[in-house]
Amino acid sequence: MEVKITKIGNSQGIIIPKSIIEQCGFAEKVNLEVKDNHLIVSPVADNPRKGWGKAIIVAGVDEKEELLMCDYLEHSWDEEEWTW
């Protein structure tokens, strides 16, 4: 489908027909990406962290790795200088 690029203030834009918006599952926001001189418009993920838990499990734990525990990172500056 060929559409016209329209001047909108200091920018330019295109009108996307409602049927295409519905087919693509677009809501109020979309992601824009340029790849190999092509504009890719995709729906924004409902949960950007979806799948992180599984990815961490799949990645496994290296015996050399330790969990970062914040207890040893405390400093007197936290109480004296910082306003919570």
Image (cartoon, rainbow, N blue to C red):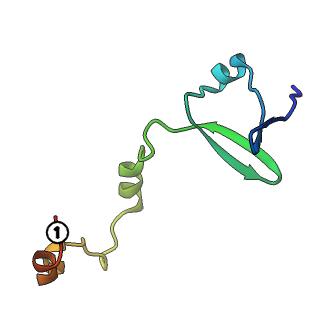
Specify whether 27 is left or right of 7: left
Quadrant in the picture for the N terminus: top right
Q: Residue furthest top?
A: 19
The type of residue carrying mark 1 is: Thr
Between 68 and 78, which is closer to the camera in this rendering? 78
Residue 46 position, x and y percent, is: 46, 35
Task: Name above or below for residue 33 compared with residue 79.
Answer: above
* Image quadrant where residue 76 sits: bottom left
Residue 75 position, x and y percent, is: 14, 82
Q: Residue furthest bottom?
A: 76
Task: Name above or below for residue 42 compared with residue 80.
Answer: above
Between 18 and 46, which is closer to the camera in this rendering? 18
Specify whether 1 is left or right of 49: right
The residue at which mark 1 appears reads as 83
Residue 70 position, x and y percent, is: 18, 72
Q: Residue visible at 17% across and 68% down?
A: 83
- Local packing at callout 1 (Cα closer than 10 Å; few below 14, some 14-19, many 20+) is few
Between 79 and 33, which is closer to the camera in this rendering? 79
Residue 51 position, x and y percent, is: 42, 46
Q: Residue furthest front?
A: 9
Task: Name above or below for residue 12 compared with residue 83.
Answer: above
Q: Residue visible at 70% across and 16% down?
A: 19
Q: Secondary structure at mark 1?
A: loop
Q: Residue visible at 69% across and 18% down?
A: 18
Specify whether 52 is left or right of 73: right
Q: Residue visible at 54% across and 38% down?
A: 44
* Image quadrant where residue 23 sits: top right
